[in-house]
Amino acid sequence: AERDVIENVRLRWPGATLHVRHALMQGGQCAGQVITELRLLDDHDDVDVIVIARDGGSVEDLLPFSDEALIRAVHAATTPVVSAIGHEPDTPILDLV
């Protein structure tokens, strides 16, 4: 997912500056790590949009992207957040924020 996002941003907006942050994308620590990185990016004045991206997986693998604390953190962010989680049939709650 990371490579796809970077490649598409560079093709569409060649002058864009990317700040890539990494977090676990499944498991018990996923939501907390994503929240931490989200807040770090949200604090930067030069960040215009935040993309949270992950390839598809099982329903269980994608559950952290329906975590209430993550949903609340995204809602509270002052920077627009784009959810790019899973494949088209996947709909974590993050997609609805």
Image (cartoon, grey):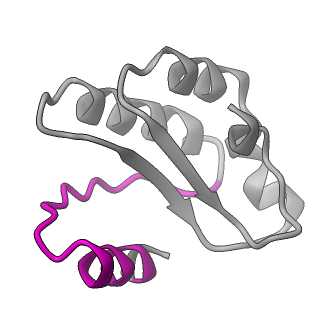
Quadrant containing the C terminus in the rendered view: top right
Classify residue 10 as left or right of residue 28: left
Q: Residue at x 64, y 42 (%)?
A: 28
Give 49 or 53, whichever is nearer the viewer. 49
The quadrant where residue 36 appears: top left
Q: Quadrant of residue 48?
A: top left
| Residue 94, position as x, y percentages in the image | 69, 39
Q: Nearer the viewer, residue 27 or 67?
A: 67
Predominant SS along the magenta part = loop
Q: Which residues are magenta?
A: 4-26
Residue 17 falls inside the magenta stretch: yes
Q: How many marks?
A: 0
The image quadrant of residue 49 is top left
The structure residue drawn at horizontal position 33% and vertical position 26%, both measured from the top left corner, is: 39
Where residue 52 appears, as percent x and y from the top left, is: 49, 52
Left or right of 42? Residue 31 is right
